[in-house]
Each structure stands twice: as C-alpha cells, then as structure tokens.
Image: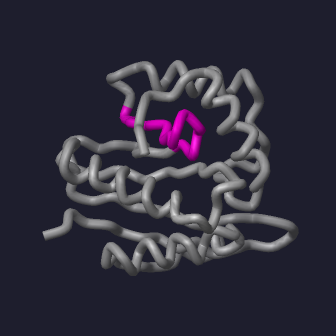
Amino acid sequence: MTVGPPTREDLEQVRQWRNLIPEALRTPFMLTEEQQEHYYLQLCDRSAPVRMWCFYEAHELLGFGGLQGIQWENGRAEISLVLNPALRRKGWGTKIVDEILRRAFQDLRLLTVVAEVYRCNPAIEFWERIAGGWGAKKTSLPRTKYWQGRLFDSLILTFVEPG
C-alpha cells in the first residue's frame, strides 16, 4: 500500500463514495462538487488542523482518510475514513486505519485520537473490531444522528498512543 496527498480527481471519487452512505454522514446532505473543491483547498493549507491522505494499491485508489480537528496543544484529533465500497470486508479498511493511527502517534506525536460512529452506520461492526484491536475505550453519546425518522446514538472510540 502506498500513501499520498489527495488530488482533485481522487477527492471527486471520494465524494461519490461518501454520498453512497448518507446514514454515516455528519451532514444531512450530499456533498456537491463545489463543497468538495472548498474542502480540497482547505487540505492544501498546511496551517489547517487537518492531515488527510489517499491510500493506493497498484495505482488503484483504496480509500481516503486521516485526522481532522487536530488540537496540537492537546495532542488530540479525530480520525476519518472513506473506503472504496468495492473493497469493503477485504482488510483494506483495517490496514488504512492502522496506518492513520501510526502516523498520528509516531509521526505527528499526538496522544489521543477519537472516532465517532453513528449506530445507524453499517460500518459500526468494523469500528468495533478496530477498537478491540487497539484497546480503545468505548462510550456512547445518546441521540446524536437523526436518520429515517429516528434518533440514533453514536459510539465514541478513544485511541491512545500504544505503549
């Protein structure tokens, strides 16, 4: 697996993947091309509190992920991942999250990485497995996502530097 900075073309593909799973989104709307372009420009700003990467295998885009809301003074960030839907349940998500967490703790010297996953998100089991493998602390926040006429809780995972 290779890792690189996102291109506009990569992010357009990611936008399309992201819009396939509205139950997992923080926003109640699909992203437009203009919104994705604004996001791309933010990613290019090295002073922005975000570090995101694209992940490839033999030049195929596997996924996009990284760290958002970085609080350098507190050593904290939130992890984000969008995986190619055709590659789900094939181990790539785990490899990508492991690489993001390695970069967070080793390269960026962060102390804590959190993840928020809505209980209506089909990837909830994936994140539960990741949490178990990393020994993450788990807690729930009630009523955080309105989806299809009801409120769902979210699972909060707290990863800390191993060792």
Give coordinates of residue 129: x percent, y percent. Answer: 48, 77
Indicate the quadrant containing the C terminus: top left, top right, bottom left or bottom right.
bottom left
Q: Nearer the viewer, residue 147 or 123?
A: 123
* Residue farthest toward the left in the current orientation of the protein: 163
**Colouring rule applied to residues:** one colour
Relative to 94, residue 136 above or below: below
Q: Main secondary structure of the magenta part?
A: strand
| Residue at x-position 64% and y-position 56% | 87
Indicate the quadrant containing the N terminus: top left, top right, bottom left or bottom right.
top left
Start-end of magenta stretch: 49-64
Please give left or right for residue 44 compared with residue 15 in the image.
Answer: left
| Residue at x-position 35% and y-position 78% | 137
Relative to 70, residue 93 above or below: below
- Is 50 in the magenta? yes
Please give left or right for residue 66 compared with residue 46 in the image.
Answer: right
Give coordinates of residue 125: x percent, y percent. Answer: 58, 77
Q: Nearer the viewer, residue 14 or 143?
A: 14
Please give left or right for residue 85 compared with residue 75 in the image.
Answer: right
| Residue at x-position 70% and y-position 46% | 18
Give coordinates of residue 39: x percent, y percent. Answer: 57, 27
